[in-house]
Amino acid sequence: MTRLVIVGATGMVGGYALRYALDHPAVECVTAIGRRTLGISHPKLSEVLHPDFADCSALSEALSLQDAAVFCLGTYTGAVPDADLRKITVDYTIEFARVLRASSPDAAFSFLSGSGADPTGRSRMAFARYKGQAETVLLAMGFPRVYIFRPAYIYPVEPRKEPNFSYRLLRWIYPLFRTLFPDAVIQADDLARAMVDVAIGKEHECESMILENRDIRGMNKS
């Protein structure tokens, strides 16, 4: 039985990851850490409110004796100023991982990155540079298993208020886009299941992997 931490469960992918994990027979308990309350209760669920991920030291007790973490905290490009985008994408990820590594050194880490993430830091896209920076640090932190997920367009499945015009357009043309470019799309619930399954599974023990959109789709077909 696995003790699992989910960060960002109030978001789209994190929300699906939480629901899937709570129903999963191999998951003993789920600790959901976020800045806003989930508004749900479940016998497996323990909720920890943490307002500032710039300092996660206070989470050391909640993160002790954990087997795996699914990290989905993030924001959309253009939704916040560049400095905040970097802070949320890089600094928050690294700070949380630091405390998790100290509290549960054997835990696996499943990280929601994005297609085009550039560890070299040369991309003109801020999102790609910052996700790449976060990936590089995570892979060097000494976790026994780190899984980097790089989805392309994440289809929301359930209706929602889209963050910008591009997302509204992609949702409208999704059936055609999926037919023409199947490896450029992934459903949010499929992505969430893959992130949980690989973190709590034992088939990839002692491995770290970077999973592109095609790889994630393949995981859901297997």
Image: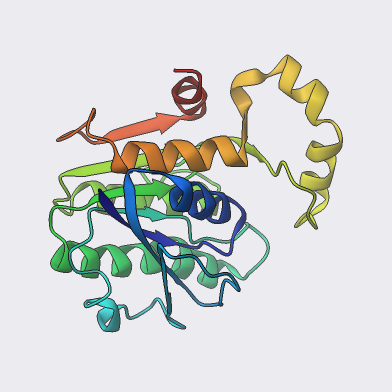
Along the horizontal axis of the image, is 96 left or right of 106? Answer: right
Along the horizontal axis of the image, is 176 left or right of 90? Answer: right
Q: Position of residue 122 (x, y in %)?
A: 42, 44
Q: Position of residue 165 (x, y in %)?
A: 83, 50
Q: Is residue 69 above or below residue 197?
A: below
Color scheme of the displayed model:
rainbow
Question: Is residue 118 among the parts visible in the rendering?
Answer: no
Question: Is residue 149 among the parts visible in the rendering?
Answer: yes
Nearest to the observer: residue 98 or residue 67: 67
Nearest to the observer: residue 155 or residue 116: 155
- What's the residue at 35%, 52% (across, down)? 133
- What's the residue at 13%, 51% (across, down)? 142
Q: Is residue 66 above or below residue 87?
A: above
Q: Count the labels in the image.
A: 0
- What's the residue at 14%, 35% (across, down)? 206
Q: Is residue 123 above or below residue 46?
A: above
Q: Is residue 169 above or below residue 104?
A: above
Nearest to the observer: residue 105 or residue 29: 29
Q: Position of residue 164 (x, y in %)?
A: 78, 55
- What's the residue at 58%, 69% (across, down)? 40
> Is the C terminus in the top left, top right, bottom left or bottom right quadrant?
top left
Along the horizontal axis of the image, is 18 left or right of 182? Answer: left
